[in-house]
């Protein structure tokens, strides 16, 4: 049978409940995020709202935050309510009484309703926090895309302007080389030709970033292209003492792509992964797909990417490698190729350590 309570006691409990809701609302209104101090404050306020305050033990879990007002030393009876965030369980609220002294009948129906109201308020508050975080990420992504778009336009202009003079330098240098017998002149001209060829390759990479390179789009199977890239990089894997795995959800999956440009994306991402991997490290290549998209993931066990520079890694000439070990164009070329295929490339942390690059491309229907 429910535990009896007088009218005066009911009024006192109602006042405590209203005070509890007001105090919790005041705490939530001042917070911009959930932290252990917030959870502790809410727990201590809840404790005061239950009829047998001295014996009530409050337990709260929300995301990675946990609070219990005192250690559970014996079996208890409790009231319970889940905290639901975006239709998913994110935590719970519990109010315990020691079972040796109380039964479930000592809890009031109004106390359960209070618990549900607090859980609802915490859900709304946490959803608001998560929405703000998503908005901040979207804003940063939009800013990054705008910056890359402007860089792409500038880069395309620079590449076009450099193509003609580089062609002239290379053409006239080859002409001089063919007409002279002087060994010193031939040696000097050879250096000019090699430098011009290198510069032309840089321009070609800039044009990849700016999506200015012609494409040969055709329906191809993905598995052979990736297997070929791994075989060709086999000696480098062996030299650096790094192993690799390859898994594919659907070995027959196909997409409309430029196979040469896809190979270039794979080479750049795999060579970067090899560069950052420790000795005896492992690189995992995974291919997944759903009804509309293909996902190629390359995961390394390196030091990861500092959050401070993550938004810049696809910019031309941005590199964390020592001077002389890279042009800073590898990832910008990857970004340009993926963008020209109407896909996107993202990075996220590989657990327990390292980085995952994910290329998302449209499937053929």
Image: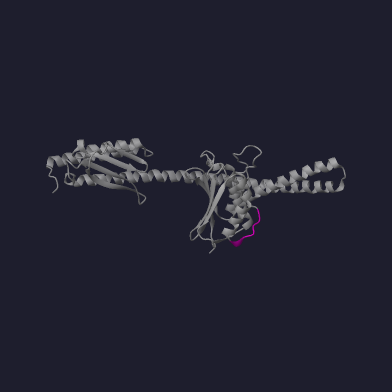
Of residues 314 and 234, the one drawn nearer to the viewer in this rendering = 234
Q: What residue is rendered at 55% in x and 50% in y? A: 244
Q: Position of residue 230 (x, y in %)?
A: 60, 53
Instruction: Please indicate whether residue 86 sits to the left or right of residue 301 in the image.
Output: left
Q: What residue is rendered at 74% in x and 43% in y? A: 195
Q: Position of residue 134 (x, y in %)?
A: 44, 46
- Is residue 217 within the magenta segment? yes
- Rendered position, 33 above or below 360: above
Q: What residue is rendered at 48% in x and 59% in y? A: 290
Q: Where is residue 328 in the image (x, y as percent from the top left)?
A: 62, 42
Residue 182: quadrant of the picture: top right
Residue 219: quadrant of the picture: bottom right
Q: What predominant SS class does the magenta segment belong to? A: loop
Of residues 127 and 330, the one drawn nearer to the viewer in this rendering = 330
Instruction: Please indicate whether residue 207 sits to the left or right of residue 357 in the image.
Output: right
Region of the chain picked out in magenta, as a range: 213-220
């Amino acid at each position: 049978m429910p535990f009896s309570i007088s009218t005066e006691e009911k009024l006192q409990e109602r006042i405590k409940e209203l005070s509890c809701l007001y105090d919790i609302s005041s705490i939530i209104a001042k917070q911009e995020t959930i932290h252990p101090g917030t959870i502790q404050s809410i727990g201590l306020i809840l404790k005061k709202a239950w009829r047998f305050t001295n014996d009530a033990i409050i337990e709260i879990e929300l995301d990675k935050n946990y609070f219990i007002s005192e250690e559970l030393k014996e079996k208890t009876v409790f009231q319970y309510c889940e905290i639901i965030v975006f239709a998913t369980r994110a935590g719970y609220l519990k109010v315990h009484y020691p079972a040796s002294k109380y039964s479930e009948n000592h809890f009031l129906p109004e106390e359960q309703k209070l618990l549900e109201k607090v859980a609802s308020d915490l859900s709304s508050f946490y959803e608001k926090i998560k929405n703000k975080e998503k908005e901040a990420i979207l804003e940063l992504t939009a800013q990054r895309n705008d910056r890359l778009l402007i860089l792409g336009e500038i880069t395309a202009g620079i590449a076009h302007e450099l193509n003609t003079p580089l062609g002239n330098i290379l053409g006239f240098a080859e002409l001089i080389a063919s007409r002279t017998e002087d060994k010193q002149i031939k040696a000097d001209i050879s250096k000019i030709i090699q430098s011009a060829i290198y510069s032309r390759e840089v321009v070609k990479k800039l044009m990849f970033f700016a999506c200015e390179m012609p494409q040969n789009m055709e329906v191809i199977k993905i598995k052979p292209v990736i297997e070929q890239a791994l075989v060709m990089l086999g000696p480098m894997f062996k030299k650096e003492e790094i192993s690799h795995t390859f898994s594919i959800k659907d070995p027959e999956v196909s997409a409309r792509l430029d196979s040469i440009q896809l190979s270039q994306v794979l080479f750049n991402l795999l060579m970067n992964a090899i560069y950052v991997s420790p000795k005896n490290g492992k690189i995992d290549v995974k291919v997944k797909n759903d009804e509309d998209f293909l996902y190629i993931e390359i995961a390394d066990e390196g030091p990861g990417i500092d959050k401070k520079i993550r938004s810049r890694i696809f910019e031309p000439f941005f590199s964390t490698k020592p001077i002389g070990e890279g042009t800073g164009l590898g990832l910008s070329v990857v970004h340009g190729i993926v963008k020209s295929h109407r896909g996107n490339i993202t990075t996220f942390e590989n657990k327990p350590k390292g980085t995952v690059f994910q290329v998302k491309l449209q499937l053929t229907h």
